[in-house]
Image (tube, rainbow, N blue to C red):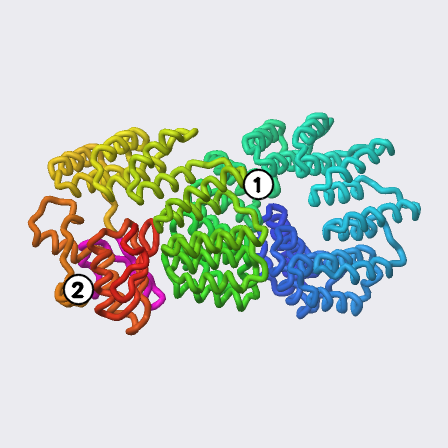
């Protein structure tokens, strides 16, 4: 008897502990205590299931429900609503139907709360016919049942059906309350239907219905989402009482309208008023911190999240990760991610996007592969985030594998993902694969057309880029300012000066697009590369905008190509004042001096760079082999295969010289002996990468190398010889374009 009492006492104390943890949102702690119980009762099963459902952890809800069925505990009318909500959120209609059958078996089909939950589940699974069938079968409908069906229509975008049912409800003798109006007004917010929202507002006023804080908050949200933010604020200010819901509505309204400072101000006002923030507050205000780069405010909100036990909420965790990554604090973002007990596709996506956006492409790829090993299925946003990481690393093989995964997941026809896929193939040097994706698209948007036009331009196929652009115009797709950057850049890369001038005029006069600084930079680059330096300079002087560093550096680069010292010095002087810490401008001027043999000036400039602490970025090239990216730095001897790489280069150099190759030591920007210069040239990073590729890839396959700097003239010339000697195509991507070397010829025709 004493043993039974002790067992009951353990159950009682454990129950209290579990409920306390659930009340604080500490699901993992509640789960630990729960798992230690030998036979938890139905009350505790329900508590845990409801707790997981509240935090959006729907898969865990289903798992708990399945386990509950295997025990002696029989689910009750408190169990089913949360389980059905989980099925609906997962759009698992088959799972929902199984639960429906179980409800019938347990005799709860006539329970109005359970039936209303069934209506909601079918609606969320896009089975509106089944939802309405369930609703019509109800013999006793209360206001909750009517509101559920109205909400189903409203949330599925069928506002007219929702309003028709609303009128039918009132005709049946049930008077709409604040909840009904809040549902309909919220639907207007989602659909941005301002006129219908105003009509409902007027209905409330005419009917002299009490404007509860709940309805007022829905009105604030509706006006904000429909772009009438000032009306929303007026309603908010006139509310006799504000609660958490109304503050959240005002904050999210400001964020929706990109008025981030005001959103943060309302958050601070909310604190002063003593309104305690919740998980919705956090997910509403954190994007404001993210876009403003307000890391301090973001950390403050993070503190509230921890204090209020909202860490387990998957949406809050995702918002925190996004905030930290946008504030360039990837380390803390990853810590938040790693601490999340449950992750949904959004949380994976924001962490992957954070890595990819900030240049941590290898980390992004590792995380993507980790995601694939979980039960969370990637969506179109995942693929759109990870493909740029492949593009940045020029990791074609991994990009192909991801493409294969897209096909398996049925997302290869998604227009959003297809654009990212085209961009990946283009930037990995496989223009043909990019074009195949483009041609297979059932519909093409502006992004996919622009990506393909830009791809042809980057690869030096200017005529093809312009031809595709003309096809785009004929298809009825209207180009934007980004498209014209791609067009003008394509003209620049291939020396199509007249065409570039024509399309610049077309942009201004035909499409009424005001040129931006990036368009002017393209035009200066176009004229400068073609040797029309004075014309380019006059173009700059005639600009209606103050030229920025992109515009002036385009002309400085042209001065480097044509060794124009006087104009180069003028541009460099202006650039040094604009961006004193940009080492690239000093290097360009140094290259101009070196090109005309003014070594004293080179030495002086390098001395200035040393005094102000500027260092040239070392040349780095990378190549993918064996599903891994290998990086090489100029003069680097650390690679395990260096001896073999060095021997391969020496052998190639001997063969090249027999073919007529002469090392161009002008590209060694130091006053050294010729023999020393030739030794340095031999170990430029792209030559090391090419030699590695020849050793580690099958004969006849294309070698693809990416470089962090512009390819030097000697390496460009040497690669032409190598492509002829080894009988293989070599594709080199530098900072501005692609070079396709084949049979001793480069696609750029030595114009770059």
Residue 342 in sight in this render: no
Residue 671: where, in percent of width, then height? 10, 44
* Badge count: 2
- Magenta range is 620-643
Residue 234: where, in percent of width, then height? 69, 27
Q: Nearer the viewer, residue 656 or 648?
A: 656
Residue 648: where, in percent of width, then height? 17, 67
Secondary structure of residue under mark 1: helix
Give the farthest residue toward the bottom.
699
Please check the rendered image and state whether residue 205 is part of the magenta-colored stretch, yes or no.
Answer: no
Residue at x 33% of width, y 55% of height = 733
Q: Which residue is mark 2?
A: 649
Quick check: 233 above or below 123?
Answer: above
**Earlier residue among tags 1 and 2:** 1
Crowd class of label 1 (few under 14; some 14 to 19; many from 20; radius 10 Å): many
Residue at x 37% of width, y 58% of height = 394
Crowd class of label 2 (few under 14; some 14 to 19; many from 20; radius 10 Å): many
Quarter of the image with the N terminus is bottom right
Q: Which residue is mark 1?
A: 282
Residue at x 44% of width, y 64% of height = 433
Residue 46 in sight in this render: yes
Q: Nearer the viewer, residue 737 or 242?
A: 737
Please give left or right for residue 639 compared with residue 464 in the image: left
Residue at x 66% of width, y 28% of height = 230
Asked where in the image residue 76 lies, by quadrant, the reply is bottom right
**CA separation in Å, label 1 and label 2:** 58 Å
């Amino acid at each position: 008897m004493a043993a039974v009492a002790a067992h009951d006492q353990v159950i009682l104390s454990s129950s209290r502990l579990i409920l306390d943890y659930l009340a604080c949102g500490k699901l993992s702690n509640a789960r630990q205590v729960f798992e230690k119980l030998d036979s938890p009762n139905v009350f505790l099963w329900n508590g845990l299931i409801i707790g997981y459902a509240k935090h959006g952890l729907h898969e865990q809800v289903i798992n708990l429900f399945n386990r509950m069925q295997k025990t002696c505990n029989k689910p009750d009318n408190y169990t089913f609503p949360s389980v059905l909500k989980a099925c609906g959120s997962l759009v698992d209609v088959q799972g929902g139907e199984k639960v429906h059958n179980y409800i019938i078996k347990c005799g709860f089909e006539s329970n109005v709360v359970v039936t209303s939950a069934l209506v909601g589940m079918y609606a969320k699974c896009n089975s509106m016919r089944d939802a309405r069938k369930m609703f019509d079968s109800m013999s006793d409908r209360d206001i909750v049942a009517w509101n559920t069906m109205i909400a189903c229509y409203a949330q599925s975008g069928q506002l007219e059906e929702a309003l028709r049912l609303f009128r039918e409800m009132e005709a049946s003798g049930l008077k709409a309350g604040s909840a009904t109006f809040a549902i309909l007004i919220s639907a207007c917010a989602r659909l941005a239907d301002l006129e219908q929202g105003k009509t409902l507002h007027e209905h409330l006023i005419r009917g002299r219905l009490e404007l509860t804080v709940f309805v007022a908050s829905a009105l604030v949200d509706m006006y904000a989402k429909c772009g009438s933010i000032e009306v929303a604020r007026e309603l908010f200010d006139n509310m006799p009482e504000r609660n958490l819901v109304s503050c959240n509505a005002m904050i999210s309204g400001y964020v929706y309208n990109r008025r981030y400072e005001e959103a943060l101000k309302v958050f601070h006002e909310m604190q002063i008023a003593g309104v305690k923030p919740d998980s919705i507050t956090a997910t509403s205000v954190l994007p404001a911190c993210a876009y403003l780069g307000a890391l301090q405010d973001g950390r403050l909100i993070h503190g509230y999240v921890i204090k209020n036990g909202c860490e387990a909420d998957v949406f809050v965790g995702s918002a925190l990760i996004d905030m930290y990554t946008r504030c360039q604090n990837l380390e803390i973002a990853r810590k938040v991610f790693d601490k999340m007990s449950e992750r949904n596709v959004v949380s994976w996506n924001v962490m992957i996007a954070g890595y990819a956006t900030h240049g941590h492409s290898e980390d992004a790829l590792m995380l993507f592969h980790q995601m694939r090993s979980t039960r969370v299925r990637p969506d179109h946003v995942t693929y759109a985030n990870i493909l740029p990481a492949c593009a940045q690393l020029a990791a074609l093989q991994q990009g192909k594998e991801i493409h294969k995964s897209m096909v398996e997941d049925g997302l290869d026809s998604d227009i959003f993902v297809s654009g990212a896929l085209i961009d990946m193939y283009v930037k990995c040097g496989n223009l043909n694969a990019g074009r195949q994706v483009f041609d297979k698209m059932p519909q093409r948007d502006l992004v996919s057309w622009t990506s393909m036009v830009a791809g042809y331009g980057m690869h030096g196929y200017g005529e093809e880029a312009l031809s595709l652009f003309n096809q785009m115009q004929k298809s009825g797709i209207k180009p934007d300012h980004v498209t014209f950057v791609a067009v003008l850049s394509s003209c620049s890369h291939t020396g199509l000066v007249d065409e570039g001038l024509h399309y610049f005029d077309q942009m201004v006069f035909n499409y009424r697009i005001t040129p931006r600084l990036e368009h002017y930079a393209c035009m200066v680059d176009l004229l400068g590369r073609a040797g029309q330096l004075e014309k380019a300079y006059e173009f700059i002087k005639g600009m209606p905008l103050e030229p920025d560093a992109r515009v002036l550096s385009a002309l400085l680069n042209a001065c480097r190509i044509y060794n124009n010292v006087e104009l180069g010095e003028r541009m460099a002087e202006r650039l040094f004042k604009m961006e004193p810490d940009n080492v690239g401008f000093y290097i360009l001027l140094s290259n101009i001096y070196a090109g005309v043999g003014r070594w004293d000036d080179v030495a002086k400039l390098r001395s200035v760079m040393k005094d102000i602490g500027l260092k040239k970025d070392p040349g780095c090239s990378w190549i993918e082999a064996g599903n891994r990216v290998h990086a090489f730095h100029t003069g680097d001897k650390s690679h395990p295969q260096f001896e073999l790489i060095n021997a391969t280069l020496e052998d190639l150099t001997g063969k090249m010289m027999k073919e007529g190759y002469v090392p161009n030591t002008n590209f060694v920007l130091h006053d050294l002996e010729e023999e020393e210069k030739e030794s340095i040239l031999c170990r430029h990073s792209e030559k090391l990468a090419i030699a590695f590729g020849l050793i580690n890839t099958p004969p006849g396959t294309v070698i693809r190398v990416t470089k962090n700097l512009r390819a030097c003239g000697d390496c460009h010339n040497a690669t032409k010889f190598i492509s002829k000697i080894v009988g293989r195509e070599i594709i080199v991507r530098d900072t501005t374009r692609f070079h396709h070397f084949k049979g001793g010829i480069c696609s750029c025709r030595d114009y770059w």
